[in-house]
Amino acid sequence: MKYGVVKMGFCPIGKFVFSHEDAKHYKGKLESRMDQLGVNYIGIDQAITDGIVRSYDDVEPVVNYLKEQKIDCLFIPHCNFGTESAAGLIAKRLGVPVLLWGPRDEAPLEDGSRYRDSLCGMFATSKVLNKLGVPFTYIENCRVEDQELEDGLDTFLRAANVVKSLKNPRIGLVGNRIDFFWSTIIDESDLLQKFGVEILPFDLVNIINQTKAVVREERPRIQQELEELSKKLDITRLTDEGRYHIIALKDVFLRLAKENNLRAIATESFMSLIEELDACIAYSQAACSDAGIPNICESDVHGAISSIIAEAAALNTEPSFLADVTVRHPENDNGFLLWHDSFPFTLKHPDSPAHLGSHWILEGFNPGMCHWRLKDGDITIIRFDGERGQYKLLAEESTTIPGPFTQNTYVWVEVPNWKSFERKLIEGPYIHHTACIYGRYKDVLQEACKYIEHLSFDR
């Protein structure tokens, strides 16, 4: 099921004054279409007759039933007209993202009568939703078979997954904020109050001790994993113990995530861990991200939230990567470099060599930094950030382009208008750390922000 991570309440709306049989016909057509598209939906047939809302009396049983089903979002298609008071109250009381749509009406019958006025009903319901302060997504009036419906459902369900991902996420903070990185200072209390973000701190000494204990207790198993890893990338530059530690630290990260229900981790990535474990920990973070838990360098909690949002837009099917927006392309005025040191290995370009080595500019780092180029494709660049209690979500779509070789993990991309994008990043409230996800999700993120209080979309 393509959209299995999102549970959608399916609440068809009708009205007594139009053909109930035609409403049932369109309900069935829509169910078949959603089955074809892989939508995970919960109907209301067990709550009311024929599973179609037709009066105010249907509100309470439908709300109670869908609350029991713990839906993530609500679809209220208008199948013959629309009982706007019931539709509005159901949407209001459930408090989840709402999708409004209705099938395009056919021509009147020969005698001038009509089986339904779905569009007319939606005009009424949209007014009630606005009156009740209920944000909603609208798919323009079209036929069940039209591409507009498929595209609209895709955008809505992805947006609903983004909203779901920001319901009380827990983020692990391994270590402290790096002292000279003032750009990653955050207001932890404000994040908790506004978004329910819980930050769980973990002491570096305990993390180091756990990592070394894993090596002592599971050395043969780690040796086998290193042998498999060496078939994919060159790890010969690492020290003997450093090799074992980067695998063990990855395991510690994933265990912390599982035991504490963490959605992401922000890590003090240097210098203590590097000095104590005899290796840069970039691969540990990259492997953790590849396993479904974004592991963000340089204690960037806002970057971790950005990655959670990015992966939710992609329905949690592919890892994100946190990149620095760095130098402009030497020839393409709209091109620039996305770069850092711990991008997931599964995103590597198939033609790119790969090794774990030194940091290309900072001295004193033990080997362990990731070095490879990322694959080609469309990439959405995302940054959640804020200052003085005001939070914004910046998103831009880009496409990979050819560019010069550089060290560590990287990919060159272009955007439609670099000058506008540059100015947005500079004028803030952003920094150059951006969560990136393969695919084009700007419209999804804009739609999601309708439903996330205290967060505005910055297109």
Image (cartoon, rainbow, N blue to C red):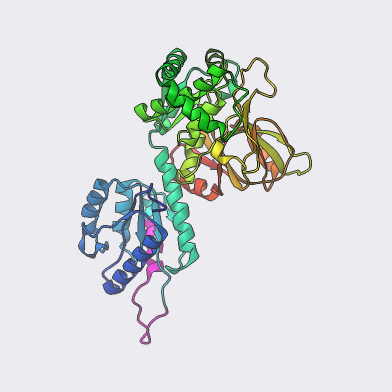
When asked about the image quadrant of residue 218, the answer is: top left
Decide whether residue 118 is among the magenta residues: yes
Q: Nearer the viewer, residue 70 or 225?
A: 225
Q: Nearer the viewer, residue 13 or 370?
A: 370
Question: Residue 380: where, in percent of width, then height?
Answer: 58, 44
Q: Which contiguous range is marked in magenta?
A: 107-128
Image height of 61 relative to 13, above or below = above
Question: Residue 107: where, in percent of width, then height?
Answer: 42, 79
Residue 389 visible within the image: no
Q: Give the tally of numbered discs.
A: 0
Q: Quadrant of the C terminus?
A: top right
Q: Nearer the viewer, residue 334 or 142?
A: 334
Question: Residue 10: where, in percent of width, then height?
Answer: 32, 57
Residue, x 48% and y 45% (percent of image)? 313
Image height of 406 relative to 11, above or below = above
Q: Is residue 417 left or right of residue 66?
A: right
When asked about the image quadrant of residue 28, the answer is: bottom left
Question: What residue occupies the far bottom of the structure in this picture?
Answer: 110
